[in-house]
Image: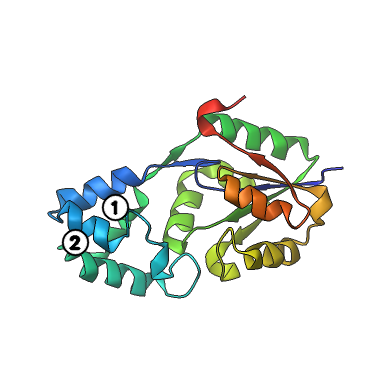
């Protein structure tokens, strides 16, 4: 019997539109090649920010310097956070689940302090979740085994009583290795 529902954040509870961030950086005068080389094709995870290896200050400093930006720290943070929008269908689902009080609601997400604080402040329905398993606090990233091991303990869930909803098949497969049931969510095919 399912007692716990564990949600991913990006492209499950909120849309992630990396291209909006990229466009803001390019509009500031950074050449596309510089952006793409710095972020390895859009992947900033290698910098260690989402896995809790570096602080927000270090992350922003590395990005401003590495991209040769003429932005303030605040301007960069605003641009970095301007990639999210609501997924109305999931907002409704989360509100309904919370009001019914049948399930414990959790989050397990690869995210950063800047993004998570912004999302909590902007999308009130995310705050309806009972407990957050955040990659930067758990010091690991999906689909690494370590994040699932730490999340099971930190969230205090029994894997066989838990359902994990993520948009990436690789993350679902990793959770299934621990006995967690999964649903691969497609925001473009919400039923």
Mark 1 — residue?
79
Locate residue 82 relative to residue 115 in the image: left or right: left
Residue 108 circle label: none
* Label 2 element class: loop
> Would residue 75 be seen by someone viewing this image from the given angle?
no
Q: Is residue 190 above or below residue 64?
A: above
Q: Which residue is painted at 31% across and 68% down in the image?
A: 60
Mark 2 — residue?
71
Locate residue 6 relative to residue 103 in the image: left or right: left
Q: Nearer the viewer, residue 171 or 86?
A: 171
> Would residue 15 be seen by someone viewing this image from the given angle?
yes
State how far apart marks 2 and 1 are (Cα): 10 Å
Locate residue 186 relative to residue 42 in the image: left or right: right
Quadrant including the N terminus = top right
Where residue 181 appears, as percent x and y from the top left, is 75, 46
Q: Are marks 2 and 1 in contact (CB under 8 Å)?
A: yes
Locate residue 25 relative to residue 101 in the image: left or right: left
Quadrant including the C terminus = top right
Q: Nearer the viewer, residue 127 or 14?
A: 14
Where residue 124 appears, as percent x and y from the top left, is 54, 43
């Amino acid at each position: 019997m399912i007692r716990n529902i564990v949600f991913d954040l990006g492209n499950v509870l909120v849309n992630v539109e990396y291209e909006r961030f990229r466009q803001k950086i390019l509009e500031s005068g950074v050449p596309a090649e510089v952006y793409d080389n710095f972020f390895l094709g859009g992947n900033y995870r290698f910098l260690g920010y989402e896995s809790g290896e570096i602080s927000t200050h270090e992350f922003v400093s590395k990005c401003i310097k590495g991209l040769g930006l003429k932005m303030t720290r605040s301007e960069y943070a605003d641009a970095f956070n301007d990639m999210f929008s609501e997924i109305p269908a999931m907002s409704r689902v989360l509100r309904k689940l919370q009001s019914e009080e049948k399930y414990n609601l959790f989050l397990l997400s690869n995210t950063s302090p800047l993004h998570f604080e912004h999302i909590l402040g902007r999308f009130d329905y995310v705050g309806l979740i009972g407990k957050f398993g955040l990659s930067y606090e758990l010091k690991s990233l999906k689909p690494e085994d370590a994040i699932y091991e730490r999340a099971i303990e930190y969230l205090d869930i029994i894997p066989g009583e838990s359902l994990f909803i993520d948009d990436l098949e690789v993350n679902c497969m990793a959770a299934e290795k621990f006995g967690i049931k999964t649903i691969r969510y497609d925001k473009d095919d919400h039923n």
